[in-house]
Amino acid sequence: MKFNIKRAFRVWQRHFMVFTKLYKSSIAFNFIEPVLYLIAMGLGVGGLVKEVNGMPYINFIAPGLIASSSMFATSSECSYGTYIRMTFQKTFDAILTTPININDLIAGELLWGATKSVFYGTVIIIVISLFGLVDSPLIILAIPVLLISGIIFAEIAVIAAATVPGIDSFSFFFTLVITPSFLFSGIFFPVDTLPTVVQKIAFFTPLYHLVNIVRSLSMGSLNTVMNDIIWLITVAIILSPLPFKLLKKRMLP
Amino acid sequence: MQCYMSLMNIITANNITKDYKEVRAVNNVSYAIERGEFYGFLGPNGAGKTTVMSMIYCYMPPTSGTLNIFEMDVTKSASLIKSRMGVMPQDSNLDPDLSVIENLIVYARYFDIPKSISIERARDLLSFVELQEKKDVNIQNLSGGMKRRLLLARALINNPEILILDEPTTGLDPHSRRDVWTRLAELKSQGMTLILTTHYMEEAENLCDRVAIMDSGKIISIDSPSSLMNVHNGNLEHVYMTLTGRGLKG
């Protein structure tokens, strides 16, 4: 998985350029959905549940939506997006005829995926701040954390892109991996209200740790943040050889 | 075992074999291509031409054998080799998310060519392939022939010393085909080394200094089109049938 960072950045630049051409439609899409959740759950469920952990329900869920928005953005970029560039568009084939080598290319995909996590998470930070749902300026520290978690989501999605038999299979990836993670990572209710088994499973999802971090920062607390950050960094490193190994295997049989 | 070594050679391949799982796509081939030469790999679909080419542009390494380009090993110096090479692929892999000129500029950036230079170079190349007016058009709105011309322009963005052309005129009408030939001949006259695969005999006869005739993963003959035709008394198609005992289109 040795790669050249400058050449990986060239791939990043290509994606960024395409993104700036198309961002109006894509970013609106990604920011409307979390806002819909915020309104529907925050006001709907919030009408029944007055407080969770001592805060109004809508304030409880708002930081979690920063985390989920970044997860969804990166997961679709590096699953559908990577797959389409690899197969239908043959973008990868074109890039590989230049000095960019396959490891540079894969690193570029991961870095771009992580960047989208930062973009989409930051948009929600701004939105919920405007709604007055953030208590502390420490939320700014969530931005670099989104880069780390973004690398994990990118790694997982690239692993999916490298192993699916066809593009339709991504619906399994989203239904069986991403959506359960979204529902059981403590965004809408504290994980400790769930059976112990589910709590244990939740511990193994990156989203759970990201939600913990973002919620703490939003409340102005740094107490438990470090453990979760260490968890994220460790997992990002452990997973890192896999996208390289599997995507290479997929592209060069 | 043949071994090629010469200062004139820009590419030397010795005993190259390439296996895909159980299939041997290229079987122990050796060849050498001289600087400034127009070299053709000729053969039917499935003969191994595209595999030979993809090893030259460092897309995949040989299973065994040595392949040196610019006196560098493809398995060790891929990036450096590719920086001095242009590739025109068989299928369009233009970037559909970008316009015509953006395709050239983004591609140039992969070679570390700064935008100030690439913009000028892209304009020159678009006029070389007569696509100046299509500069800001989306790729989807180009005809097949225009896409081919743009692929040629893109392959030239880094001023390559070697230009690889994988079936450069397949699917083009006779007029567009002649058009591409004229441009390729012009590049050759500027001293570029060109390597092409084709299954059109006429194309090889018209353009190539030498051709390597391939069949079932092997090179069965290497010579200039004219001496092949002299020796075997007929055009290249006849030569091919004599050598392989079958037609080229099969």
Image: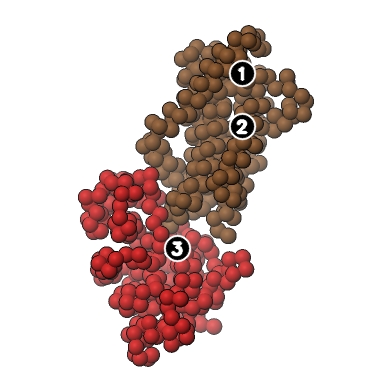
Chain colours: A brown, B red
Type of the residue with mark 1: Ser
Give the Cα distance between marks 1 and 2. 23 Å
To the question of a shared chain for discs 3 and 2, the answer is no
The image quadrant that residue B86 belongs to is bottom left
Disc 1 crowd rating (10 Å Cα; few below 14, some 14-19, many 20+) is many
Q: Secondary structure at mark 2?
A: helix
Q: Chain of mark 1?
A: A
Asked whether the viewer can see residue A240, the reply is yes
Q: Which quadrant of the rendered structure holds the C terminus of chain A?
A: bottom right
Nearer to us of marks 1 and 2 is: 2
Disc 3 crowd rating (10 Å Cα; few below 14, some 14-19, many 20+) is many
Q: Which mark is residue B57?
A: 3
Residue to which mark 2 is pinned? A179
To the question of a shared chain for discs 3 and 1, the answer is no
Q: Chain of mark 2?
A: A
Type of the residue with mark 3: Tyr
In the depicted structure, whether residue A43 falls above or below residue B94: above
Residue to which mark 1 is pinned? A216
Tell me if label 1 and label 2 are in contact, CB under 8 Å: no
Q: Nearer the viewer, residue B162 or B241?
A: B241
In the depicted structure, whether residue A151 falls above or below residue B176: above
Residue at horizontal 47 percent and vertical 64 percent from the top: B54
Nearer to us of marks 3 and 2 is: 2
Q: Secondary structure at mark 1?
A: helix
In the depicted structure, whether residue B137 falls above or below residue B25: above
In primary-sequence order, the first of circles 1 and 2 is 2
Q: Which percent across, then down, holds residue B112?
A: 38, 49
Disc 2 crowd rating (10 Å Cα; few below 14, some 14-19, many 20+) is some
Tell me if label 3 and label 1 are in contact, CB under 8 Å: no
